[in-house]
């Protein structure tokens, strides 16, 4: 019996058993190394995917929080939540699912095609021709999948919007017994969402089914055509067996490619929806080259506000403010009065630059507010709204709002606004945790915290937008005392429906349908017997009947 020479030189001089053991060890080592590198590759792919996802989510959040108030008034919260969470997660799945493997699948398909043409071109051509219809079908089903996936995400946005709306308004839902009605609305949206998801599942399954059938047809075609070639002795059985294996190997990477491509389509849908949000223009921007060169605005200690021929419309040609032209002098206390819809709150929004005037300009201490950095402007102007928003977290953080103020400064602002005693009576004092929207505080306590939030920033201009309208008598007395301290040497703009609370202001501006119709002190306006006098007499009459 002839002794077969070893295939590799490093096995020379070894017995068969020794050589076999070395080869087994080498094989196991190769498998072990492959597993290590596969694990490292999987970890790195996942890590890169998560880093990209986190970066996209951060950029998206930063962009959304930079958008104007106008955008948020027309966009449901649930839609934004879906895009920042679900859509970004779908984009991350593209990387986390091993998208890099698509390159390997493509190379495998290309290599197999080259090899089979080198082996037998007729059978190779038949297999290649079968790729044409399957590719067309895959493209068709993937397009349908993408459309269905987009619609499914739109319905998911509506679902999240309705969920957020019902949770935020749960008191109204329960008080007016809308549980059943809202459940029906939710059920109808959920049904539409399920139908769209079913469409995505159908189109995804159609791709897999198509590939299964085509691969079986390909094997049958190889057997039919290859069998005739074997009978004609143009090829041998070994070549036919090779092509059967090639047919299976050709469609396996194609199947994997199609599965990954489905994830790609979901990612493309997410990119499309994210791009729509990222393409929303940032209306309120700081100038690239600012004309404001006077340093820190709050160090100027003035407080003059001037509206010059200001026009403003939320919708085109539907002006809520028309040709406003007035000046508020430093340290002056001015009240804005008028019927509902007269434009009082719009003036405040323009002053704080939440909106831009349609025409005209607004100046603070002689500087156009468009030439002042927004951070500087909003530090200079302190606004207290009728309903204050509190964040989940401790009391101290709700006063500082992330800025670097010391505990002593926080305590001083609380003392100025008469809430220090209440805070110190709490178990954890300034570290007491507040629930979402401050639901573990009363309305008056939340409003006092809002005053402390403004007091710590020491603004030169103070704006009160119905800040005391919903308070009880005791709390209002505390706030009035705090206001007397805050208003010293500050310009103040006060919006109040209760005209009795603004008798002592320096000047009252009376608005009607966006126009300034009267201006003067309380006594002077009463003597004019105009709109202000009518509103005041009407309120006094209502109070008398009460």
Image (tube, grey):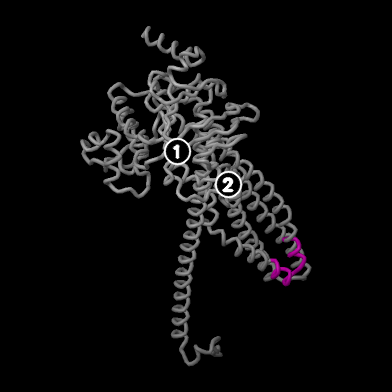
Looking at the rendered image, the quarter that the N terminus falls into is bottom right
Q: Is residue 348 left or right of residue 107?
A: left
Foreground of the two, 107 or 8: 107
On screen, 314 above or below 67?
Answer: above
Quick check: can you spot residue 87? yes
On screen, 134 above or below 28?
Answer: above
Foreground of the two, 473 or 192: 473
Chain part drawn in magenta: 113-127
The residue singled out by tag 1 in the image is 303
Is residue 118 within the magenta segment? yes
Q: Secondary structure at mark 2?
A: helix
Q: Are marks 2 and 1 in contact (CB under 8 Å)?
A: no
On screen, 224 above or below 268?
Answer: below
Is residue 107 within the magenta segment? no
The kind of secondary structure the magenta stretch mainly shows is helix
On screen, 274 above or below 422?
Answer: below
Q: Position of residue 274 (x, y in %)?
A: 57, 46
Foreground of the two, 112 or 224: 112
Q: Is residue 18 left or right of residue 225?
A: left
Q: Nearer the viewer, mark 2 or mark 1?
A: 1
What's the residue at 54%, 87% (across, down)?
8
What's the residue at 52%, 35% (across, down)?
306
């Amino acid at each position: 019996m002839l002794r077969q020479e070893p295939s590799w030189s490093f096995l020379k001089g070894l017995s068969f058993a020794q050589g076999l053991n070395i080869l087994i060890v080498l094989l196991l080592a190769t498998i072990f190394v492959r597993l290590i590198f596969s694990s490292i590759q999987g970890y790195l792919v996942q890590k890169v995917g998560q880093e990209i996802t986190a970066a996209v989510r951060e950029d998206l959040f930063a962009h959304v929080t930079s958008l104007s108030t106008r955008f948020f008034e027309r966009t449901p919260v649930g839609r934004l939540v879906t895009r920042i969470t679900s859509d970004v997660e779908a984009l991350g799945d593209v990387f986390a699912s091993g998208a890099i493997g698509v390159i390997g699948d493509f190379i495998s398909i290309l290599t197999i095609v080259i090899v089979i043409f080198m082996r037998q071109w007729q059978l190779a051509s038949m297999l290649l021709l079968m790729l044409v219809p399957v590719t067309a079908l895959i493209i068709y089903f993937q397009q349908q999948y993408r459309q269905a996936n987009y619609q499914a995400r739109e319905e998911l946005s509506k679902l999240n919007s309705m969920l957020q709306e019902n949770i935020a308004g749960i008191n109204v839902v329960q008080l007016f017994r809308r549980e059943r009605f809202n459940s029906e609305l939710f059920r109808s949206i959920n049904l539409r969402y399920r139908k769209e998801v079913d469409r995505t599942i159908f189109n995804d399954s159609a791709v897999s089914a198509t590939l299964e059938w085509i691969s079986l047809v390909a094997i049958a075609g190889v057997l039919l055509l290859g069998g005739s070639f074997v009978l004609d002795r143009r090829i041998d059985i070994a070549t036919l067996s090779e092509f059967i294996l090639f047919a299976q190997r050709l469609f396996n990477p194609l199947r994997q490619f199609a599965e990954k491509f489905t994830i790609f389509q979901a990612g493309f849908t997410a990119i499309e929806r994210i791009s729509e949000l990222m393409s929303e223009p940032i209306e309120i921007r700081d100038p690239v080259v600012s004309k404001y060169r006077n340093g820190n605005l709050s160090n100027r200690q003035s407080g003059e506000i001037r509206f010059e021929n200001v026009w403003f419309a939320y919708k085109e040609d539907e002006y809520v403010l028309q040709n406003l032209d007035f000046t508020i002098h430093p340290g002056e206390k001015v009240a804005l009065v008028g019927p509902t819809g007269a434009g009082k709150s719009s003036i405040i929004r323009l002053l704080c630059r939440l909106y831009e005037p349609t025409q005209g300009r607004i100046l603070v201490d002689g500087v156009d507010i468009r030439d002042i950095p927004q951070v500087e402007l909003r530090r200079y102007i302190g606004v207290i709204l009728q309903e204050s928003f509190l964040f989940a977290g401790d009391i101290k953080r709700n006063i500082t709002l992330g800025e670097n103020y010391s505990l002593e400064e926080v305590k001083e602002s609380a003392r100025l606004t008469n809430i220090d005693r209440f805070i110190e009576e709490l178990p954890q004092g300034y570290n007491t945790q507040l629930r979402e929207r401050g639901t573990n505080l009363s309305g008056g306590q939340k409003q006092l915290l809002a005053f402390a939030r403004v007091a710590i920033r020491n603004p030169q201009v103070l704006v009160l937008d119905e800040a005391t309208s919903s308070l009880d008598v005791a709390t209002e007395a505390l706030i009035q005392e705090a206001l007397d301290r805050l208003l010293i040497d500050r310009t103040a703009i006060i919006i109040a429906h209760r005209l009795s609370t603004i008798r002592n202001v320096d000047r009252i501006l009376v608005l009607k349908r966006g126009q300034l119709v009267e201006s003067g002190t309380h006594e002077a306006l009463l003597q004019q017997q105009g709109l202000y006098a009518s509103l005041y007499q009407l309120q006094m009459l209502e109070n008398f009947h009460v």
